[in-house]
Image (cartoon, rainbow, N blue to C red):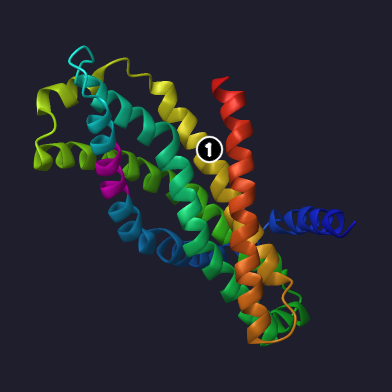
Amino acid sequence: MHYFYHIGAFFLMLKEVFKKPEKWKVFWEQLFREIDDLGLKSLGIVGFIAFFVGGVVSIQTALNVESPFIPKYLIGFATKRSVILEFAPTFISVILAGKVGSYITSSIGTMRVTEQIDALEIMGINSINYLVLPKVVAVLLFYPVLVVLAMFLGIFGGWAAGIITDLFFTEDYIMGIQLDFDPYFIQYALIKTLVFAFVMVTIASYHGHRVSGGALEVGRASTKAVVWTSIVIILLNYFLTQMLLG
């Protein structure tokens, strides 16, 4: 029953999130601030991880394709498929759940325990709409950009790793990238990204908004938000893959 209570409270929160903002000027200011905090400041970690994971995928594939009867272009093909279908949308989302999710929970939770949210509500402001809606819109607008960047850097990192280690030739890798390219896979990855981004922000905001106590409870709420966000993303990844590719 405890879980059903939180599921119900979560959906009641969503009802408040998607109400019309009281002042659009304030909303746009919040939106651009959230794009900077939640999106632009994540570019570095996303680019770094995507580049090196792409390199690891291509090296592992090359080391396991030692038979002369297996063409070398399969290294580029496997790297492309792995990065686009799974790594970029799912792995990056789980990483951002830890970075961005904990930030959202801690920032909203701190406002709750310092009674800033109470002050907003006393002034008649819908605190959930004011705090959460700009975050939701920001990640839905910017996270597809992050995932496309992760795709590019992952594939580029795979090529760079192969050239540095001399495990395959550039011509074979490019041939593998071009082999059997289906634009629907990009669309599939972006759909998953939008779903995961929405889940990440709303679950983190829910835990932050319901914090009670002090700084210790804020830390516990941040940990709980990251754990539950990761669990939901993994479960949704299974069902979305079945529905969109099955």
Q: Nearer the viewer, residue 149 or 30?
A: 149
Determine whether 244 is above or below 236 in the image: above
- Above or below, 159 against 78 in this view is below
Tell me the residue at 18%/36% (across/down): 159
Residue 241 horizontal/vertical position (percent): 56, 29
Residue 113 pos. (x, y %): 69, 84
Q: Amino acid at mark 1?
A: Lys
- Specify whether residue 78 is in view: yes
Residue placed furthest toward the right: 1
Q: Can you tell which quarter of the image residue 75 is in? A: top left
Question: Which SS does the magenta portion mostly show?
Answer: helix
Q: Which residues are magenta?
A: 50-57
Which residue is at a point 32% across and 48% down the rendered structure image? Answer: 50
User: On the rendered image, what quadrant is the C terminus found in?
Assistant: top right
**Please, which residue is most extreme toward the top here?**
69
Q: Which residue in the structure is indicated by mark 1? A: 192
Residue 39 in which image quadrant? bottom left
Count residues near mark 1 (Cα–Cα under 10 Å), then give few for <14, some for 14-19, many for 20+: many
Q: Where is residue 221 drawn, in percent x and y?
A: 66, 71
* In the image: residue 177, left or right of residue 118: left
- Which image quadrant: the N terminus? bottom right
| Residue 52 lies in the magenta stretch | yes
Is residue 12 shown above or below 180? below
Q: Is residue 153 visible?
A: no
Does residue 196 appear to the left or right of 120 in the view shown? left
Query: Magenta stretch containing residue 12, yes or no?
Result: no
For the residue pair 229 and 149, the one nearer the viewer reads as: 229
